[in-house]
Amino acid sequence: MSSIYETGHAKNVANLLKFNQLIATFGTSYNPSNATITAAGLNTLYTTANTSLNNVNSVYNTWKNATNNREIAFLPLDKLSTQLLGALQATSAPQQTINDMVYLVRKIRGFSKKIKADASKVANPNENPIALPDPDPSANISVSISNSQQSYDQKLQHFAKLILLLQSVSSYNPNEVSLQVASLQTLLTNLTTLNNAANTAYANLKAARISRNLVFYASITGMLDRIRNSKAYIKSLYGASSQQFVAANNIHFVRVVSKKKAK
């Protein structure tokens, strides 16, 4: 969400407090029959709106921390997958198995540009520490990997398949602990936990925003419709040119979310 979008909600809450403070100056003369726009009803609305806004902010911070933790944990995965390919290439694994590994490494790294099949081609040292031959070095084909497969869920799937592939190779038994299958399985578990935490935090954030939007922007029961009705009552009570109505009408509210979406 943009800062402008979020600021709009906060401004509405702040202006609701100002609106209620203005109504308090009217005393007992402000006495609408509509219970949703009485002074007590609007004060309750302010408490509810402020609570829902603070809840969104709190849940947002939780989500942001969870996504940051996930991003940091996934960051070394590209380099690690290339190292694992090198470790596999150093074994007696058949070429087809290595080709399958190349495919998975490319999926994890998210290669998007087309790479001509050339088994002897050396990859850019700034991009990949180890050359990545095409899945079938004998075929004169181009392989295109889509960036659309760069989501964390998909990375986890590709990494899990990569581990299973290494596990199936009897000659794969590196001395480096970080490259051993047991270490990779532990890493996969940790990454899965962090990914699930981030996904759960996002679901909670969406739920909090939906709840807030209902309080602020729902038809009839939402803050904006109730304020509109209150202003109409003030106009009927004091007159359209009255100082009371002019003061109330000058307190502006912004419809950040449409009534259609606030359901």
Image (spheres, helix red, strand yellow):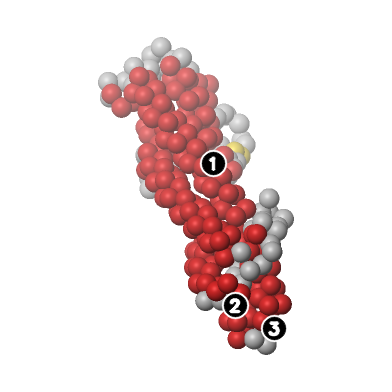
Disc with the residue nearer the chain's start (3 vs 2) = 3
- Label 3 amino acid? Gly
Give how far apart the Cα atoms at labels 1 and 3 are: 47 Å
Asked if one can make out residue 47 in the rendered structure from this viewpoint, the answer is yes
Residue occupying image coordinates x 53% and y 21%: 96
Instruction: Give me the residue at 50% from left, 37% from top.
Output: 200
Q: Secondary structure at mark 1?
A: helix
Instruction: Mark 1 vs mark 3: give the one in front.
Output: 3
What amino acid is labelled 1 in the image? Ala
Residue 162's place in the image compared with 69, above or below, is above
Task: State the CA–CA distance, disc 3 to disc 2.
Answer: 12 Å
Q: Which residue is mark 1?
A: 203
Q: Which comes sooner in the sequence, label 1 or label 3?
A: 1
Q: In terms of depth relative to the viewer, which is nearer, 201 or 73?
A: 201
Residue closer to the observer: 48 or 214: 48
Secondary structure state at the residue bearing disc 2: helix
Q: Is 235 rendered above or below residue 195?
A: below
In front: label 1 or label 2: 2
Asked if labels 2 and 1 touch by Cβ distance under 8 angstroms, the answer is no
Residue 1 coordinates in the image, percent (x, y): 53, 57
Viewed as shown, does residue 213 lie left or right of 157? right
The residue closer to the viewer here, 263 or 132, is 263
Q: Check disc 3 and report the residue beneath it.
A: 239
Question: In terms of depth relative to the viewer, which is nearer, 34 or 186?
Answer: 34
> Where in the figure is residue 226, as x and y percent of width and height?
65, 64
Disc 2 marks which residue?
248
What secondary structure is marked by label 3? loop
> Of the residues shown, which amino acid type is indicated by label 2?
Ala
Residue closest to the far front: 28
**Do the residues bearing badges 1 and 3 touch, measured as CB atoms within 8 Å?**
no
The mark that comes first in sequence, 1 or 2, is 1
